[in-house]
Amino acid sequence: MNASAAPAESLNRGLFASAAATFIVLWASGFIAAKYGLPYAEPFTLMACRFFVASVVMTLACFALRAQWPRTARQTVHLLISGFGIQSVYLIGVYYGIWYGVSTGVTALVVGLQPLLTGGIAMLLLGERPTARNWAGLLLGFMGLALVVWDRVASPSESLWGLGFLILGLLGITAGTLYQKRFCGTFDVRPAVALQNMISFATTIILAFAFETRVIDWTADFVFAVLWSAVALSMFASCLFFWLIQRGAAARVTSLIYLSPPTTAVMGWAMFGEVMSWMAIGGMALAMTGVALAVRQK
């Protein structure tokens, strides 16, 4: 998302490092929370629960804090359309990718290439002039992804259907980001996050009624997964991300995305015993090096 109209403030290194570390851990934990909750509900059902809680709590917070909602119907529609890609399609890809057996580390890698894909499309369609470092990053990033995907094809421990859903999620968040940059302008982050959760709830509850049984095993683990996803991720992590951007840290925050896949891989190993092959680990390292190069500004 774009920042709101609030003036940018500089961040000292210590504060940025603390906030950035918190953001990366929260962002990476999202893939773990999805896998943690999926044994107890189907993907659309689990997502609908997450987005319902986040929508209610975030909307109440917006009214309590007197946040500025969009002033026109057009701006509201633009935010809902961008949110459909950034939240709905993206997380449908993530949840169904994990549901079909893709490890959390590979999931984070595929969707973590969003800055790379967005940058590549911007170069082609928006006339942005790439540097040699940008081209090298794009090449390395997609070579790394190719290695990981080839490893999955050659030794299919994970479903190709799952990888297909992850590609869908990657395309969704990329399209939503580009749409938002083009049409949404500046806005108050808090209502924007609330609106994104609303459109995502509407989307996933309809899909749950259309394609799933909607049976939920109401265990403590399921409730924890929903609450963590709704509060820590859909609300706190999103607001922290925009708080950093509003204070002039946009480039540095974007570059943090390449730290998410290895962080998630470590969490997946610790929580679920997930192990990646050496080819997949090498591909991840190559891809993340590419992302780091591609998003670096200087």
Image: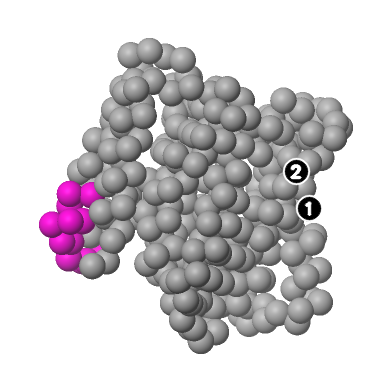
Residue 247 rendering spot, x and y as whole percentages: 49, 78
Name the residue: 27% across, 66% down: 297
In this rendering, the label closer to the viewer, 1 or 2: 2
Q: Is residue 141 visible?
A: yes
The stretch in magenta equals 126-137
Q: Would residue 130 be counted in the magenta stretch? A: yes
Q: Which residue is mark 1?
A: 53
Type of residue at label 2? Val
**Horizontal side of residue 73 vs 224, given as left or right:** left
Residue 144 rendering spot, x and y as whole percentages: 28, 35
Per the image, label 1 sits on a secondary structure element best described as: helix
Name the residue: 63% across, 30% down: 271
How many neighbours does mark 1 have within 10 angstroms: few (below 14), some (14-19), or many (20 or more)?
Answer: many
Q: Earlier in the sequence, mark 1 or mark 2?
A: 1
In three-dimensional space, the C-alpha distance between marks 1 and 2, rounded to whole angstroms, equals: 8 Å
Q: Of all residues shown, which one is farthest toward the front? A: 14
Q: Which residue is mark 2?
A: 226
- Residue 98: which disc? none
Asked if labels 2 and 1 touch by Cβ distance under 8 angstroms, the answer is: yes
